[in-house]
Amino acid sequence: MKVIIAEKPDQGKTLASIFQTKKREGYIEILPNELFPKGAYMTWAVGHLFELAPPETYEASWKRWTLDTLPIIPDRFQYEIDRKKAKQFAIIKQLLRKPEVIEIIHAGDAGREGELIIRNIIYMSGVKKPIKRLWISSLTPKAIEQGFRQLLDEKQTRPLYEEAYARTCADWLVGINASRVYTILLKQKGMNDVFSVGRVQTPTLALIVRREKEIEQFRSEPFWEVVATFDVDGKRYEGKWWHENETRTYDRELAEKVSAFCRRKQVEVAEVVCERKTFLPPLLFNLSTLQATANKRFKYSPQKTLDILQKLYQKGYVSYPRSDSQYVTKGEAETFPHILKQLSQKEEYAPYFPLVHESILHNKRYVNEKKVTDHYAIIPTEQVPNLTKLSQDERNIYDLVVRRLIAAHSEEAIFDYTTIVTVVDGRARFISKGKKQIQAGWRDVLMSQDDDVQLLPNVQSGEKGTVYDVYVKEGKTQPPKRYTEGELITLMKTAGKFLDDEQLEKVLAKTEGLGTEATRASIITTLKQRNYIEIKNNQVYVTDKGKVLIDAIGPHLLASPEMTAKWEQRLSEIGEEKASATAFMEQVKKLAAKIVADAVQVANHWSFEGLDTTSIQQKKKTTIGKHVGVCKLCGGSVIDKGSFYGCVNYAKTKCSFTISKTILGKSISQANVKKLLAEGKTSVIKGFKKGENTFNAAVIWNEKEKRISFSFEK
């Protein structure tokens, strides 16, 4: 028999759905079939079951946040089981150790994080049995069956595990040392807060702070434009006074003089330039471009878009969501006519059929094997859903993906762009610009809106007329706009563009920017959770805390996109077996030590002049360590441990009693925790969320099962 390990429960159930099965606790038994003549066990992780051990696991003195203990650099990294997920690991380990199990099928997500999650489980179980790799980019029955028939040898994807493991350890080293040294040094300056520093989050924050400073330092200036309406043989159009290639003047008196000069004067059309431009349909979506589009269209946060996309993927309706490619291979392109035929039968998409291009199989704009790495672009699968059964959010995202595919099979959009130069009384030159849509093409599919540009009449060079009207229009220069969350995703992807030519040469052309497709949304979420940024009306604002940290770090490489760009490049090379993970880690250890030394050296020069640090200096004292009740398992003291309440005896006896401060989206107040520990039950709490449903319930202690549970309202 074989054990198949998926990354998540829903994914495991979907993978098993093409077989006859029996449900068991923590796994599914697949009955004997053509693919598995002796049957198989389908089980799953719940995301990461293991996490890197905290510093004090290696050395007791490393628990203390002092400069004397830095840098923290373990000789060898260790993993610890996530206590909340220990039960599932025990089930997996028991299955792997069964004597009849002769092979393991690694069925994690087809990417480096999927490699890490499942291989860690296998390695930590201590079981050494042959491993095969399921590698698929969609969860349709056809793709699942094909994937099981074409399993890879685990050696083919092992380098991705090496890449993911190196990234995890390296991020831990930089995060632990940088966060501690800046928190300690800033506390000496009166900042009573914890400052989280990370390889990706900190350069991203630095870009946001830079934009904030540009806005703060911007000084608006008034300007004036002279706007005239011309009448040329009954054809009227507007133009702006054009002087030294500018339509603006910062001299009001000059603008008034030009306006007065032009009144009722004769004009001549000096030049007419008409240029026809053809616009090809946009590329297919990768995760970043889809997140940016969904944010612009629906104001969805990048994380929300990824979550919705993940649901659609698990239901088998779209391909792998965390893709960084906007291209497909010929294999995918061959399925498009079948997918589009099904979509044409949907009322929403029927008006766009028949398509101009029945197939794009030979169109290299979309079909390019060389530009498809682990995954191809995000596309709808042949499993087309009943749209009425999707939630509104799912429908919105699915619609974006579908329309992008239809657009790829549509005509180009064609516009005529016209520029007219009109001369008043042989002296004052005016410029008029306009455009005319000749062919809507793919723009009809993507519902693109025309720009607010005037349509110009058909005038010829040399024609004469008069100034019908003229006036002076006053305006003010505008500061740079704050980023939206969607723009921030795009900014992170293209962060290398902010480097100068010399730096770009060093970074190499193949940079990933800040983070990867899979991590950018979580980085923005982390910045929110750390109170470095706030989102108001879909605009990103930096907090005083964020400004203080970036001001303290200054021009250090830690806040530069260059370091992360180089880092991602080297990690990618490890995954391609072009670089050594060991050599990379040695460099990271030196970097961690340098970060500590550099911070200590510059701390004496910190002033934070011009920054409001009051809210950070007056931050309320933490309640961490406060006693809230008696442990239900061992009778020890339950204390506030930050994001959860836990038993003090964990360090001594490994007592696993914990109560999360947030359960199913609801914050559990300290008063309710005390009541639960004293009486076994909280007051009724309203608004717990499970999927798209909400419910009201009291949180209770189930003495029989020794766990937290719910008591529902009658």
Image: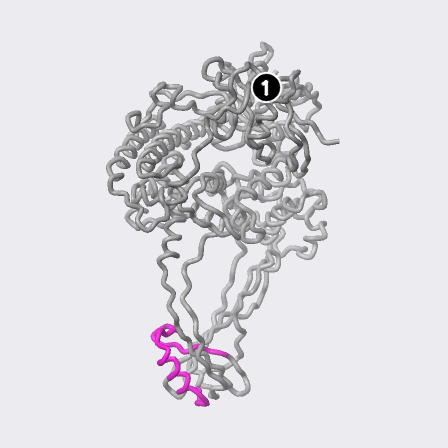
**Colouring style:** one colour
Q: Quadrant of residue 60?
A: top left
Residue located 37% across and 78% down the image? 252
Position in image of residue 647 (x %, y %): 51, 20
Q: Which stretch is magenta?
A: 238-267
Position in image of residue 462 (x %, y %): 44, 85
Q: Give the residue pinned by disc 1.
A: 3
On the question of residue 440 being in view, the answer is: yes
Which of these two is toward me, 362 or 247? 247
Q: Residue furthest top?
A: 99
Residue located 35% across and 58% down the image? 217
Q: Quadrant of residue 151?
A: top right
Say if 688 sits above or below 652 in the image: below
Residue located 72% across and 31% down the image? 713
Position in image of residue 617 (x %, y %): 37, 41
The quadrant of the rendering that contains the N terminus is top right
On the question of residue 315 being in view, the answer is: no
Which of these two is toward me, 25 or 602? 602
Q: Quadrant of residue 58?
A: top left
Q: Residue furthest right?
A: 714
Position in image of residue 137 (x %, y %): 56, 36
Magenta stretch encompasses residue 250: yes
Three-letter amino acid code at the position of disc 1: Val
Which of these two is toward me, 478 or 77? 478
Report the label total: 1
